[in-house]
Image (cartoon, helix red, strand yellow):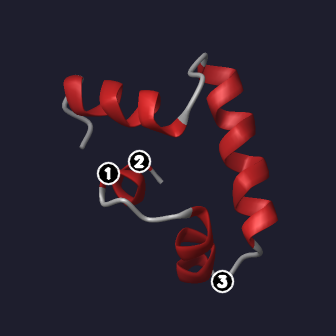
């Protein structure tokens, strides 16, 4: 998801690639962001770049 976000993909595009409903992807993203303490996908992507994950 972080790589997809870094490429500027929308939730709908990510969902389509994974063959999942957009709502499911949105729910999973929200859950993960909450667990790791990030407020947004952009914030998670920024930190992932800084840490060399992407």
How crowded is the residue under tag 2: few (<14 C-alpha within 10 Å), some, or many (20+)?
some
Image x and y of residue 53, in percent:
26, 37
- Residue indicated by mark 3: 19
Q: Earlier in the sequence, mark 1 or mark 3?
A: 1
Q: Residue at x 61, y 16 (%)?
A: 37
Residue 31 lies left or right of residue 52; in this view the side is: right
Marks 1 and 2, how far apart in space?
6 Å
Q: Nearer the viewer, mark 1 or mark 3?
A: 1
In the figure, is residue 32 to the left or right of 3? right
Q: Which residue is mark 1?
A: 6
Q: Residue 23, image x and y in percent?
A: 80, 63
Residue 2 is marked as 2
Mark 2 and mark 3 in contact? Answer it, CB < 8 Å. no
Q: Quadrant of the C terminus?
A: top left
Q: Residue at x 53, y 80 (%)?
A: 17
> Residue 12 placed where, x, y %?
62, 72
Q: CA distance from mark 2 to mark 3?
A: 18 Å
The Cα–Cα distance between marks 1 and 3, rounded to whole angstroms, is 20 Å
Kindly check if marks 1 and 2 are in contact, taking CB atoms under 8 A apart as contact.
Answer: yes
Q: Disc count in the image?
A: 3
Counting residues from the N terminus, which is met first, the one under dot 2 or under dot 3? 2
* Res. 49 image quadrant: top left
Tell me what residue is drawn at x 73 percent, y 69 percent. 22
* Helix, strand or loop for disc 1: helix
Rendered position, 20 above or below 7: below
């Amino acid at each position: 998801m972080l790589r997809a976000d870094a490429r500027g993909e929308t939730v709908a595009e990510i969902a389509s690639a994974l063959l999942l409903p957009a709502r499911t992807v949105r729910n999973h993203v929200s859950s993960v962001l909450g667990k790791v303490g990030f407020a947004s996908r952009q914030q998670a992507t920024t930190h992932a770049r800084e840490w060399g994950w992407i």
